[in-house]
Amino acid sequence: MEQLFVIKIGGNVIDDENNLLAFLKKFAAIPGLKILIHGGGKIATKIGGKLGIESKYIDGRRITDAETIDLVTMVYGGLLNKSIVAKLQLIPATKRPVTKEGIDFGFVGDVISSQLAVGSLQIMIDNNLIPVIAPLTHNSKGQMLNTNADTIASALAVALSKLYAVRLIYCFEKKGVLENVNDENSAMPLITKEIYQQLKSDNKLFDGILPKIDTAFAAIADGVKEVLIGNADDLLQNITEETPGTLIK
Amino acid sequence: MEQLFVIKIGGNVIDDENNLLAFLKKFAAIPGLKILIHGGGKIATKIGGKLGIESKYIDGRRITDAETIDLVTMVYGGLLNKSIVAKLQLIPATKRPVTKEGIDFGFVGDVISSQLAVGSLQIMIDNNLIPVIAPLTHNSKGQMLNTNADTIASALAVALSKLYAVRLIYCFEKKGVLENVNDENSAMPLITKEIYQQLKSDNKLFDGILPKIDTAFAAIADGVKEVLIGNADDLLQNITEETPGTLIK
């Protein structure tokens, strides 16, 4: 049998940023098959304190109440796990530059679909694993960045359209792109480029939907087969039959 | 090309637990290849408020400062992503029952290695992807549970030992199992069952190390090739040469 390292790091290694970086550098260099399992560290107690969540112990063992399970899910599964993965690999992005007007959006990442390495996603998809992706990216130097989820969905859809016939589906609370903002039942079944230009010049679309439609047309131009925008419930209910919501093509 | 659904759900679907459950039920039932990308929802603002992190916007767009990127990494990548994955699949566990003494540890999960489905890990490992695993489990009904990271490492090592020659490595701040608690340089190179019994009856071991060694022997009895306990730095430095730290076999 091939050799596999199952490596666990404890809290003390994680608590110190420099220790962690030194560790991960060496971990990355280990040849062969490997898994990394990390513990918690002191940061959960620190953030819990700020949130007013008291750490309770009986005989030295932590009692995990409803507040505490949310806390450790955030800190272990979110902050620590993603930071470790960012230092190893995740969706790379570029920090958004300061605008001409001098606005710095901070730790916001812009992704470029041609730079996405979708090989790992392909492996999962082809083996019937279902990737569940949070809208977080990194700058390839271990710094997490915040990215718009619509944008990530579109960038991944474009990158994957080289490998699959991709249908990109935006689920939200409305029934689609509304022709009349005040009428929830005015969802348009189809938007073509011509229809879109007309709607924009007529000033008919509500603000929030404009970037979604722009992103949709950009995705189609770059290889995505079609984009559907609509109500979460309706779309998935009938995804293989006649599609409700707004089809963009 | 085979069809792939790239499905994005927005914050409004996530904010309501019942909406989210209904959505995921339908998502799970979609036949064929699929990816799920989720947005943030209002919970980041809510938890940020409790932590004293103010949401700042310029022209309606969020400014992500250093505090905010940690916040969204926790909430989007941790709380939301793991909750969604738990509702779909993750490491299953059983909530620890109330003890004879009436102690309820709360949302704490005990894992059983024979119940771990390591198929998805195997796919990743065999394709040179490196799983990075946080010590979080779920009860197969969507409830997150908190589990000791040493235990998860051991349970996964055992489950994977049916497929690979597994070396389980516990990295922490000490140089190994110390023969003299007060002497950091007294790490023992080897512990066999006989040595362990002797050490225990001599009362020589510091408290924290006992469960680690017990877990190590249990893992070896169940198929793991060997267990190493030692300093994070030392172990990975020389992992393919002569191993520092304490070898358990």
Image (tube, coloured by chain):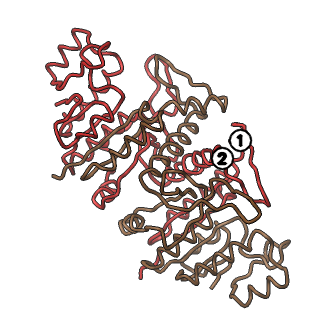
Chain colours: A brown, B red
In front: B62, or A219? Answer: B62
Kind of residue at badge 2: Thr
Q: Which residue is mark 1?
A: B53
Q: Quadrant of the N terminus of chain B?
A: bottom left
- Is label 2 on the same chain as label 1? yes
Closest to the observer: A149 or A249? A149
**In x, y percent, where is residue B185?**
26, 20
Q: According to the image, label 2 marks what residue?
A: B68
| Identity of the residue furthest to the bottom in this view | A194
> Left of B39 or right of it: where is A138?
left
- Measure the C-alpha gap from mark 2 to mark 1: 7 Å
Q: In the rendered structure, which disc, 2 or 1, sits on the residue that comes first in sequence?
A: 1
- Across and down, in percent, residue A171 comes to 64, 67
State whether residue B143 is above or below residue B200.
below
- Circles 2 and 1: CB atoms closer than 8 Å: yes
Residue B163: x and y in percent read: 21, 51
Chain under numbered label 2: B
